[in-house]
Image (spheres, helix red, strand yellow):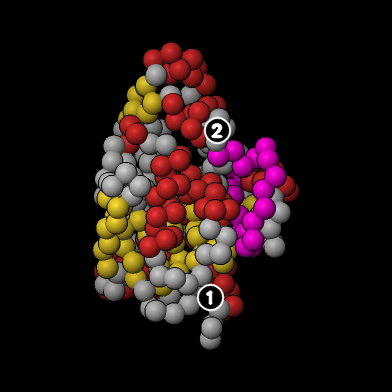
């Protein structure tokens, strides 16, 4: 499945742009369509992605067609939000997600987190359990700086540590990005794989069996150890890290969630 942006012009006309201040005062920017009832879907994008990616737009388009409230936004240093990507930290990205949760309509929230966004979704659900009705994690990149990222750039970790900052070629989004080595120490504060983890909401995980960026083994380990009302891991045969073809299954899962809240 590939999202066709030309068909969304009409369906997303009820989105309104918003801008709110992050913890350091920089602007977080995104889009909200609010029906005034039912849960609010919040999409959290991945590392070096934006809320205008294929999965994000496909989900927003479906929400509009079915009259569901939906929010998508860019983390600081990404897309239209303020900040410099050089300053990226998992702690700052988590602050952004929490700021959006605190700002969005005061109803149950379903967080759909892609890659890095999946990791952030779990962290946010720990901190704001009263807000979260369900998590939908798409190839969640738990501890990615010490997992997939370190493996991808294994020959450069020592140089990165010694220099304190390094520029990398992005094999997925194209181009280059510069990041401080301090991001690794910051990220380790949010390890979810080597500690007891308890969530108060159901968790649906979608992960491609051929994911070369984040191993599906990470999701299997997470599903086995997390304490939650319900955890389902959907292993997608032939699926890569982007998992665009899994969107129809994700939409079906979300339809069941909204049905649960019908009439409330």
Observer-side mark, 2 or 1, equals: 2
The range drawn in magenta is 190-211
Position of residue 161 relative to residue 230, above or below, is above
Q: Secondary structure at mark 2?
A: helix
| Residue under the image location 50 percent in, 60 percent down | 111
Residue 252 seen from this side: no
x and y percentages locating residue 145 in the rendered image: 51, 32
Q: Is residue 198 left or right of residue 241?
A: right
x and y percentages locating residue 118 in the rendered image: 52, 50
Asked whether residue 199 is drawn in magenta, I would say yes
The circle on residue 188 is: 2
Quarter containing the C terminus: bottom right
- Outermost residue on the right side: it is 224
Position of residue 43 relative to residue 47, above or below, is below
On the image, numbered disc 1 is attached to which residue?
258
Q: Is residue 152 left or right of residue 104?
A: right
Q: Identify the image quadrant of residue 252.
A: bottom right
* CA distance separating discs 2 and 1: 35 Å
């Amino acid at each position: 499945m590939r999202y066709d942006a030309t068909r969304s012009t009409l369906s997303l006309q009820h989105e309104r742009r918003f801008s709110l201040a992050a913890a350091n005062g920089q602007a977080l920017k995104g889009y909200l369509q609010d029906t005034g009832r039912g849960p609010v879907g919040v999409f959290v994008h991945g590392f070096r992605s934006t809320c205008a990616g294929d999965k994000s737009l496909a989900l927003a388009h479906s929400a509009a067609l079915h009259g569901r409230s939906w929010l998508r936004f860019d983390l600081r240093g990404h897309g239209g939000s303020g900040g410099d990507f050089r300053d990226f930290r998992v702690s700052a990205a988590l602050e952004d997600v929490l700021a959006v949760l605190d700002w969005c309509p005061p109803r149950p929230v379903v967080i759909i987190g892609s890659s890095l966004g999946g990791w952030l979704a779990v962290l946010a659900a720990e901190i704001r359990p009263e807000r979260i009705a369900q998590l939908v994690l798409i190839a969640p990149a738990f501890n990615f700086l010490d997992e997939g990222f370190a493996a991808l750039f294994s020959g450069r970790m020592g140089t990165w540590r010694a220099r304190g900052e390094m520029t990398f070629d992005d094999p997925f989004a194209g181009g280059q990005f510069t990041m401080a080595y301090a991001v690794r120490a910051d990220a380790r504060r949010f390890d979810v794989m080597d500690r007891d983890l308890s969530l108060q909401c159901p968790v649906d995980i979608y992960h491609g069996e051929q994911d070369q960026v984040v191993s599906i083994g990470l999701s299997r380990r997470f599903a086995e150890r997390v304490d939650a009302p319900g955890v389902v891991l959907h292993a997608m045969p032939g699926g890569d890290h982007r998992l665009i073809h899994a969107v129809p299954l994700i939409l079906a899962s979300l339809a069941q969630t909204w049905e649960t809240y019908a009439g409330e």
